[in-house]
Image: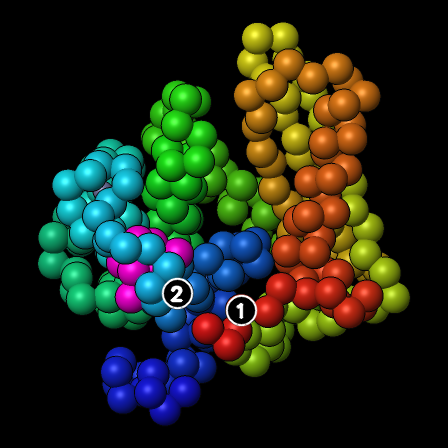
Amino acid sequence: MRTWQLMHGVSEDEIWKAIWNVGGPPKLSHFAWKACKGSLGVMDVLCRRHIRETSCCPVCNHHEETIMHTLFECKHAGTIWMQSEFLDLLTEAPSGSFSDRVRWMAEKVDKEQLRTFLALAWASWFCRNKAIFEPTTAFDPIGVATGMVKLVVDYVEYNAKVGMQSRSHHFPSAGRWFAPPGNSIKVNVDAHVTHGNGVQLGVVIRDDAGALMDAAVKSIDADWAPVMAEAGAVRYGVELALWSGAGSTAGLHESDSGE
Ligand SMILES: [Zn+2]
């Protein structure tokens, strides 16, 4: 915390509150938080940790892959921001770090816009990972970005309808993503097999009061039988539940707050 303050001249709590305040799925906050802390697994970070030998961007092969490069400058990110409402603002925005940029942006735009801004950064990260880990699958960055923004808006609207009583009215401390769930969580999964277009998996996680905790969709380029797709959806649901920290009642939760 002290080191952070010295580096950024602002407390970690302040950044966390700004991110948490915009609402949206916990996965979005989690992503934004990691990007602010400089702990997204880009080549530059991995190289400094001696996990990789080169910091060259694996997507464009032209630049050092810093967090700012991958989220704003690399080819898919560039396409996304070019079409966004933030294009003009970005020409003036600080470029030193993601947290500097988020703080600056938070003073220029309203809460909904800041949420969209984070969703587009998240979409850029998603495209980067898709390009690296699924190199043979073609995708449209604008389509990904539009889908991401819609997912975030749907989440916020759904939560507003459900009423999200206590959960959204207090700030969890940094590094903790939800108040612990009550007695149980409910994970709903869904799978659609479309011939020629792969398999779409959907997961919705609710707490025992019915409030939405997380939601995600994923498409897999595979030709699965329906029963296989169902199994894939269940597995995805379990992964997401654990990943979201919803599995903490069973003593299982992702712990990267110490990074
Ligand atoms: Zn690049």
Q: Looking at numbered disc 2 in the image, what kind of residue is underneath it?
A: Ser
Residue 167 location, x and y as percent?
67, 69
Is residue 16 something that shows in the picture? yes
Total marks drawn? 2
| Above or below, 148 relative to 232 | below
State how far apart marks 2 and 1 are (Cα): 9 Å
Residue that lies at the very extreme toward the right in this rendered image: 183
Determine if the magenta segment contains residue 46.
yes
Tag shown at residue 229: none
Q: Which residue is mark 1?
A: 256
Q: Looking at numbered disc 1 in the image, what kind of residue is underneath it?
A: Asp
Q: Secondary structure at mark 1?
A: loop
**Does mark 1 have its CB less than 8 Å from ligand 1?**
no
Q: Which residue is mark 2?
A: 39
The answer to whether residue 93 is left or right of residue 166 is left
Cβ atoms under marks 2 and 1 closer than 8 Å: yes
Span highlighted in magenta in the image: 41-48
Among the two numbered marks 2 and 1 on one chain, the one whose residue lies closer to the N terminus: 2
Residue that lies at the very extreme toward the top in this rendered image: 195
User: Quadrant of the rendered structure where residue 2 is?
Assistant: bottom left
Q: Quadrant of the N terminus?
A: bottom left
Identity of the residue drawn at 65% across and 68% down: 178
Q: Residues within 10 Å of mark 2 (few under 14, many from 20)?
A: some
Rendered-image quarter of ligand 1: top left
Q: Secondary structure at mark 2?
A: loop
User: Quadrant of the rendered structure where residue 95 is?
Assistant: bottom left
